[in-house]
Image (cartoon, rainbow, N blue to C red):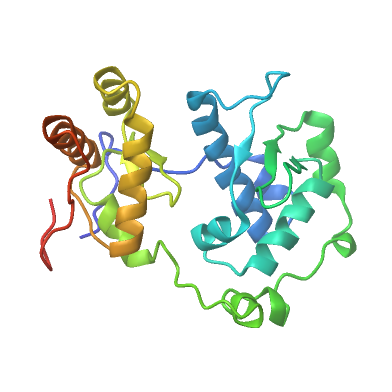
Amino acid sequence: MSDYMKTDTKLLPYLPYPRFLLGADLTQTAKVLYAVLLDRSNLSRANGWTDESGNIFVVFPLNKLADLVDKGPTTVKTALTELEAAGLIERRRCGNGMPNRIYVKQPDSQDIDHLMDRKPATRQPENRPSDSRKIGRQMAGKLTPNKISNSNLKNNLSGVSGSARIFGRYGNVFLTEAELSELQADFPTVWQEYIERLSEYMASTGKTYKSHAATIRRWAKEDRRKGGISDYSCKEGESL
């Protein structure tokens, strides 16, 4: 049940949303995508995803990004092009069949002024039929269900600390800095693999867990004890 904010209330997990976006002449989808990519860049930095020049990059397939923000691929592709034209991201090809590398840029004061002074006529309308939330996928012939529905996200947030960060390919694994540090110390070579495994499992089955850190720790210990991959499924209606 919702409750009032108090002085000691912890915030729910959130995306970094720079203040300049509020006044920037960008579509709402482009603004949300920039916040998502900025958050994913922090994860890339923690995982050491940098190129030969030391620049942090993000690998985020278009269909996964579309599922995360609950938009059609056409809408997301248009928004990415909008962000690139505004100088907020840069996409680099990595070869056939490979997702692009996305470099997220942070604008300086002059760039921000330019973003806020752009004429509205330069912005493409966002609510064309092909840019709607669901029709984009239907026109493309893909009726892929959203991996992170509002109900699943609400369930995944239950009992999660306000200082938790979002992890996993599907953006549904929540860990605090302390929990992440402990997992990295206890399982230095496989911690990231277990995060992705948990993310994929929850997205594909709709299962929820009270503590993602505890679930990963349990899975890793079971695998270590049995010397193989455990069966993590549970009965209908059961959650940890």
- Splitting the image into 4 quarters, where does residue 92 fall? top right
Q: In this image, 105 relative to 37: left or right?
A: right
**In the rendered view, would you say 238 is above or below 135?**
above
Task: Work out which quarter of the rendered image holds the N terminus and state it.
Answer: bottom left
Of 105 and 67, the residue lying toward us: 67
**In the rendered view, would you say 45 is above or below 173?**
above
Of 144 and 20, the residue lying toward us: 144
- Splitting the image into 4 quarters, where does residue 223 fall? top left
The structure residue drawn at horizontal position 61% and vertical position 80%, both measured from the top left corner, is 141
Of 214 and 6, the residue lying toward us: 214
Counting from the top left corner in percent of width and height, residue 34 is at: 64, 46
Of 124 and 98, the residue lying toward us: 98
Counting from the top left corner in percent of width and height, residue 194 is at: 31, 38
The structure residue drawn at horizontal position 30% and vertical position 59%, both measured from the top left corner, is 154
Q: Is any atom of residue 96 visible in this view?
A: yes
Q: In this image, 136 relative to 218: left or right?
A: right
Counting from the top left corner in percent of width and height, residue 224 is at: 17, 30
The structure residue drawn at horizontal position 69% and vertical position 73%, both measured from the top left corner, is 131
The structure residue drawn at horizontal position 33% and vertical position 30%, both measured from the top left corner, is 191
